[in-house]
Amino acid sequence: MTYEGYEHLIDLVAQGDEEILKAALAEIPAADIAEYIDQNFEVYSALALLDKMPSDQQAEVFGYLRPNNQEELASHMEVGVLAQLFRDMSSDERADVYALLDVKLQDAVMRRLAKREREDLLRLASYEEGTVGAVMTSDYAAIPLAGTVGDALKRLRQSAPEKETIYQTYVVDKDHRLQGVLSLRDILTAAPSETIEEIMTRDVVVLKPDMPQSEAARIISRYDLIAIPVVSDDDILIGMVTFDDAMDVVEEEDTESIHKSATVGRLESGIKDASPFIIYRSRINWLVLLVFANIFSGLGMMYFEDTIATNIALLFFLPLLIASGGNTGAQAATLIVRGMATNDVEKKDWLYMLGKELLVSVGLGVTMAAAISAVAFFRVDPVIIPIVALSMVCIVLVGSLVGVLLPFILKRVGWDPAVASAPLVTTIADAGGVLIYFGIAASFLTLTPPA
Amino acid sequence: MTYEGYEHLIDLVAQGDEEILKAALAEIPAADIAEYIDQNFEVYSALALLDKMPSDQQAEVFGYLRPNNQEELASHMEVGVLAQLFRDMSSDERADVYALLDVKLQDAVMRRLAKREREDLLRLASYEEGTVGAVMTSDYAAIPLAGTVGDALKRLRQSAPEKETIYQTYVVDKDHRLQGVLSLRDILTAAPSETIEEIMTRDVVVLKPDMPQSEAARIISRYDLIAIPVVSDDDILIGMVTFDDAMDVVEEEDTESIHKSATVGRLESGIKDASPFIIYRSRINWLVLLVFANIFSGLGMMYFEDTIATNIALLFFLPLLIASGGNTGAQAATLIVRGMATNDVEKKDWLYMLGKELLVSVGLGVTMAAAISAVAFFRVDPVIIPIVALSMVCIVLVGSLVGVLLPFILKRVGWDPAVASAPLVTTIADAGGVLIYFGIAASFLTLTPPA
């Protein structure tokens, strides 16, 4: 009985029976309907499909759509319909969609909302992107401090339809200051006559609206919470972040830091939707910067021009050696950067991690030197073997240490350590590799009498 | 009122007042106590701290500890205490800890459990790592099909303490076959006299025990669900996966695929805990493989030995050009691999993505060629400029196309596309870069009369 609403919808729309389609839509999860609309996007058929659903389902489906499709649909809707959609959407999704509209449409919709909705929308839309304020919802359940468990349950029953979750309830005083939290489980297992004050949890994990979203997601995941309240500096309850928002944030943050590790800048949409120009723009800056950074490797080559010209066989091992430094360094950097992102590795661990990497990289270097010596044995003048083997150990060592230290240094100076992955480490390791290899070769080959 | 139990605990333990500590522990979230134990791990003080908590809190804290610390503590506990811990732990965490114990201890604990717990434990422990079965819990709430909403609520109230969540309830027939699902919100907003059959949702998204965990996490995140039921092939309800398990899975999967992208193999523990040998082993195989793969670049250099020897200035641009191909390719591969991981990009999109990358990479290549020409202008014989610029465009083009295609090819042959990131793409792009650069140089320099 695995449910695949998406395939089901394709069949239904193809059949073209309005009544059957309408009845079926009620049973299909909003996420599946939204995927169908996104994958087969065409403004008028999407509007026609939305029109077949009750208004609360319309709002739910709309909330799942890709932002560019939301924008397109909103601009083709009658203002009255759009305003109704806004009324039915959850407060956080409403604020996201509002931000997509052009100023004229924003005004038109705003004028049709009730004063309370208007204020709520303006407040949520005012938080900076990436902060807790921009992802929180104001559809939380709150109850006054005075009262019994029975009162609380009655209130929750009444307000359930318009709340994002009723499984966490926030207890507030008359100034709306957060005093405690009650889970629905607490409420159900207590006697109806007990007071709220008696059974509520007073030590509450809270968020602030200006915290980064990633921090909120980390806290939700750490404490396995369904939702966390957001309070202002004077403890006034202003919102709530739910676990599903946290999951979306984690996915977004991970995408961003993975992209950064390959020097790709911020992409607002997925790679499939992004225009070629947007993709170009997200990639070109770092690439050009790295072109210039690689000049150092070139200068290294020039410096050893004579060594190379008289021992052209050295070149055979060049790509292999410098790639090895880059690869080992990229491994080390990736391990540290991920460790930092998951809070496994902290700033203070730098010396410990460096020491461990020293051990590991000597092992890696010696093994790789053995591998390259085996290659060298069949290819070249045996005099080159010790040069190549020694270079390999040194290059791997330097690459690894750069890989470990760079993320710590970037973090120290306030940059995102995620930038420290492959390309940057590789560029530094390349330049180091050229100098080490030809430096060792030059000194060895001077000592050895010419054949 | 932001809550930081961890710092609080450090102070309390330092003060050394047993009674105050005991009282305070009850208020500190289990995740914080576990962090304190993990960060300051010492077997006997950890056991002493656990001993100050009621047994259900002990079990909760124990579940949050790092696996190697769990193992260490379990082997130092009296068997009776360990068995009690097992009774109080949630069924999925219990199975995880059980798998860590040595066979003798497994036997000893098993003999002290009741028959039902024993069977449950053996069943959960039997699922392969990485599958839904290995992460699911059997502490779900289930109610029979016959009955009213009032009956359901009464049952949930009674069973609440031992269930992982009561916010989703599964409706089963007399053979324990899943018939529908009820949220606690549905139950609370319905009239007590309505029947369960009337208000339950029949179309249920379900998981199978042999599905990969990542698939389960994707489904939970897609539908914003608190929990999903797991059913056998004949629809019998056997477990449940909750949102917090899904969040842990996402974090683990992301870590693994990020490590893979830098050719780091599977690490069971975090990088900070892993021993140098374990880290060495997770990295060496790919590194040695890449050493041999880079021989192709070396062979390319040898093939053009004469061209290089007579135009040694060409070498200045070599690191720069081949790094550019690798960097562009790594960007393209990273974008595709992440797109695949988030289901944004599918197998069928390969031609579309390739076409778009063609456009993007021509843009990138031309810009980078302009940058390198500017460098060349100041450094070398002008005759080299068109060689270098043309090489840059070709190398960036080839690197990008390799970066886009490799993930699709790996996926096609059933490998994990995450392996296709930086190092592998760079290695291929390096060899291509050497051939393209010196190939172009050789043909240009033959056509141009020697100075």
Image (cartoon, coloured by chain):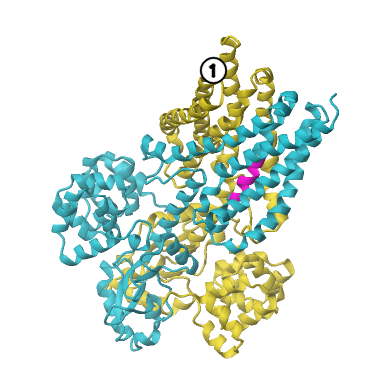
Chain colours: A yellow, B cyan
Looking at the image, which is closer to me, A253 or A157? A253
The spot of residue A194 in percent (x, y) is: 28, 72
Query: Residue A296 is drawn in which quadrant?
Result: top right
Residue at x-position 27% and y-position 80%: B175
Residue range highlighted in magenta: B325-333
| Residue under numbered circle 1 | A383
The spot of residue B405 in percent (x, y) is: 61, 53
Looking at the image, residue B159 sits to the left or right of residue A88; the answer is: left
Which quadrant does the C terminus of chain B fall into? top right
Looking at the image, which is closer to me, B358 or B444? B444
Q: Hey, what amino acid is under mark 1?
A: Val
B438 in magenta: no
Residue at x-position 36% and y-position 71%: B167
**Residue A225 shows in the view:** no
**Residue B95 shows in the view:** yes
The spot of residue B351 in percent (x, y) is: 65, 60
Looking at the image, residue B88 sits to the left or right of residue A167; the answer is: left
